[in-house]
Amino acid sequence: MATLADPVDLLGEARRIAAGVDRLFEGALADRCDGRDRLCAAMRHAGIGGGKRLRPLITVAAARLFALDEERALRAGAAIEAIHVYSLIHDDLPCMDDDDLRRGKPTVHKAFDEATAVLAGDCYHALAFELLADERTHEDPFVRSELVLELARASGIDGMGGGQAMDLAAEGETLDLGAITRLQQLKTGALIEYAVEAAVIMGRVAPEGRAPYRGYARNVGLAFQIADDLLDHEGDEEAAGKKLQKDAEMGKATFVSLLGADRARQQAQMLVDQAIEHLHAHGEEADLLRAIARYAVERDR
Amino acid sequence: MATLADPVDLLGEARRIAAGVDRLFEGALADRCDGRDRLCAAMRHAGIGGGKRLRPLITVAAARLFALDEERALRAGAAIEAIHVYSLIHDDLPCMDDDDLRRGKPTVHKAFDEATAVLAGDCYHALAFELLADERTHEDPFVRSELVLELARASGIDGMGGGQAMDLAAEGETLDLGAITRLQQLKTGALIEYAVEAAVIMGRVAPEGRAPYRGYARNVGLAFQIADDLLDHEGDEEAAGKKLQKDAEMGKATFVSLLGADRARQQAQMLVDQAIEHLHAHGEEADLLRAIARYAVERDR
């Protein structure tokens, strides 16, 4: 229930939006009743009924700033989540992070096999663009086209994919704070920034008016990453549903290893405060975005 | 040189278009001079200076039917080639076909490493949509949006990706002619059909006028696949630049194992004749498409 201290029901909104993403994925991933059933099952295993759905939540929250249709924002958010899910499936592969557990369940290559995991990731990748380019996401093809172009950029070599390559290259290297910030801005920040950008594009905000939303997104993305490093450092594997402290074991620098836990926590809080400040021109329509920013540092997993 | 018997210089056109694809990929894959350089190098290794570039050749040839700007058709063709390259990189991985050689060079995971190969494939996948959604590919956002939607469908679970899953599921099974035709229509046919469809979309052909072009594409796609099976059966590994007869070794059905070489050859020739028949309403602007159809069965690799 909304109160003065807690003006939005973040958990309730997150659950509702997660259910919407599940519904969109279920619609796309029904069994084909032929040799593709194992692929469909692997995709459902990876993408339905799990995860925080942070990126769709951000897109739907940002869509409120411009009074956009929520179902359309949800479709764009589900496209971003499809990119996120594909990246997790591929990241977990033995040749990448070699993880057995994700969201408390066996990873796709464990529950199925490696070849199916590669294909399941690739098909989530295609699904993202299929969701975006559909007229149900936006009636204006110019908007759809811009949504596609920016998602391709945010996920490719100058976004998430490039950040993952930097992460591979960093093994055995000692990155400083600037390098790790840059790496994380590409690896995880670009897609979170796009989650806000998608609403900004759908809201037809003129390019010169987009800076505050980018500022919010950049600060929140970095705050989430620092908080992830803190949770990884202090957290509980069972609650997290995945293996923790892998970076520390591999001698990789994190915000916590570079700043120490106390300064990392202060830094994350400062980023959250700045993110909320970027929304000062907005009233209560920005409350969900403000709650998401606070959640970045207040969550326990 | 063009003569009556050989009205178009297929080899010359193919070389010119391959050089155009190289140019577009080179523009996108310049070193970033940071931790992404190994990824950029792997992507250049996989995608530049090799391959028949059949799909871009088909798109540029089909674009002539509607007198479209060739540079724009080339961009759409390069997007399709980017999808093709990503699928080859991932197909060659140890957990998939485990191939060491591709286009006469070491595969990406051999020349670099598996993690880089996964990322290089993923970044070619994103590059495809980045190329398509750019206004340089088409000035009309409706056209760009349709190009994106149809490529996502042709490469995902109801296209190439789904066909690859069927191929995995077929291991140890004995497929009949209907099942193998369906498998190949998804696995390799969908992207070849899209190579024609892209030009049809850019040429703003009304939906009711698209059937002959789909017929051409479907027949040519299947003819190429049957000819591939024949080359695999009879060919020379050195000329092919890859390992041959893997399907036979694994007991997988092919058009040649099901029909025998003679009937497979007749079937491919019939498909080529039918493909050319679909172009009967066109004059010499369809000569390059006709030459490509004939090449499907006349090539030696």
Image (cartoon, coloured by chain):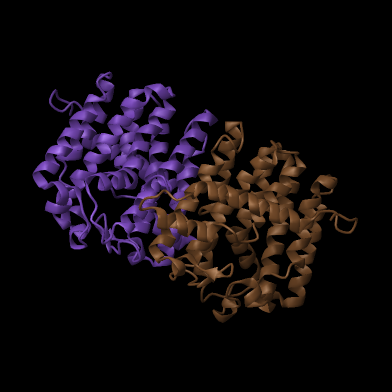
Chain colours: A purple, B brown
Does B177 sit left or right of B86 as displayed? right
**Residue A214 visible within the image:** yes
Say which of B22 and A21 sits in front. B22
Residue furthest left as drawn = A262
Q: Position of residue A259 (x, y in %)?
A: 14, 46
Q: Residue at x 17, y 53 (%)?
A: A232
Does A60 sit left or right of B208 as displayed? left
Q: Position of residue A34 (x, y in %)?
A: 52, 62
Q: Is residue A236 above or below residue A67?
A: below
Q: Residue at x 27, y 18 (%)?
A: A281
Question: Which of the 4 image quadrants contains residue B66?
Answer: top right
Q: Residue at x 30, y 44 (%)?
A: A182
Does B133 sit left or right of B254 as displayed? left
Q: Position of residue A95 (x, y in %)?
A: 35, 65
**Residue A205 visible within the image:** no
Q: Is residue A233 above or below residue A96?
A: above
In the picture, the quarter occupied by the N terminus of chain A is top left
Question: Which of the 4 image quadrants contains residue B225?
Answer: bottom right
Residue furthest front as drawn = B33
Say which of A16 and B65 sits in front. B65
Q: Position of residue A68 (x, y in %)?
A: 39, 25
Residue furthest right as drawn = B4
The image shows a total of numbered marks equal to 0
